[in-house]
Image (tube, rainbow, N blue to C red):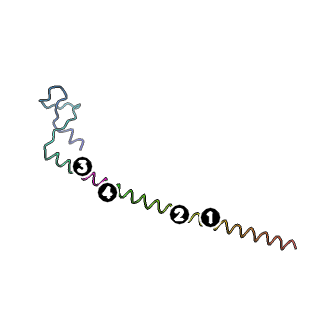
Amino acid sequence: LISQIASFPTMSSSSDKSHFSNEPSVLVPVLTAEEVAVKDDEISALRDMLKDMSEKVAEVEAVRVVQQAALEQVVEQKSRQLWDATEARDAALREIEVLRAR
């Protein structure tokens, strides 16, 4: 696209805008109405694609948030189970020590 734009004849950047120039410093491409319409269609299509991608990113982010919350809940539950099991083991070991001491 850049090479296409660069190849278009451009208006001179001097105060006399009535002639065309191939000066590389000039960045004003001359497009036909049809070319402008095509570019407008391309821009519209790209905007639509960007909107679709943004919506998909939002959906993925929403799923990620739900999954993260579920994962945190599972980790909390497993931590509690581990704590309870450790407490039960420690109580059983204390009981064994008491029985051995008799």
- State the extent of the magenta-drawn residues as a range: 43-50
Dominant secondary structure of the residues highlighted in magenta in the image: helix
Q: Are marks 1 and 3 in contact (CB under 8 Å)?
A: no
Task: Specify which label sits upstream in the sequence, 4 or 2.
Answer: 4
Task: Specify which label sits upstream in the sequence, 1 or 3.
Answer: 3
On-image quarter of the C terminus: bottom right
Q: Where is residue 77 in the image (x, y as percent from the top left)?
A: 59, 66
Q: Position of residue 54 (x, y in %)?
A: 35, 54
Q: Alpha-carbon distance for marks 1 and 3?
A: 53 Å
Q: Are marks 4 and 2 in contact (CB under 8 Å)?
A: no
Residue labelled with disc 1:
79
Q: Vertically, is 33 above or below 95?
A: above
| Amino acid residing under circle 1 | Ser
Q: Nearer the viewer, residue 34 or 7?
A: 34
Q: Where is residue 7 in the image (x, y as percent from the top left)?
A: 19, 39
Residue labelled with disc 4:
52
In the figure, residue 99 lies in which quadrant?
bottom right
Q: Where is residue 94 in the image (x, y as percent from the top left)?
A: 79, 69
Q: Nearer the viewer, residue 21 or 42?
A: 42
The magenta stretch spans residue 49: yes
Residue labelled with disc 2:
71
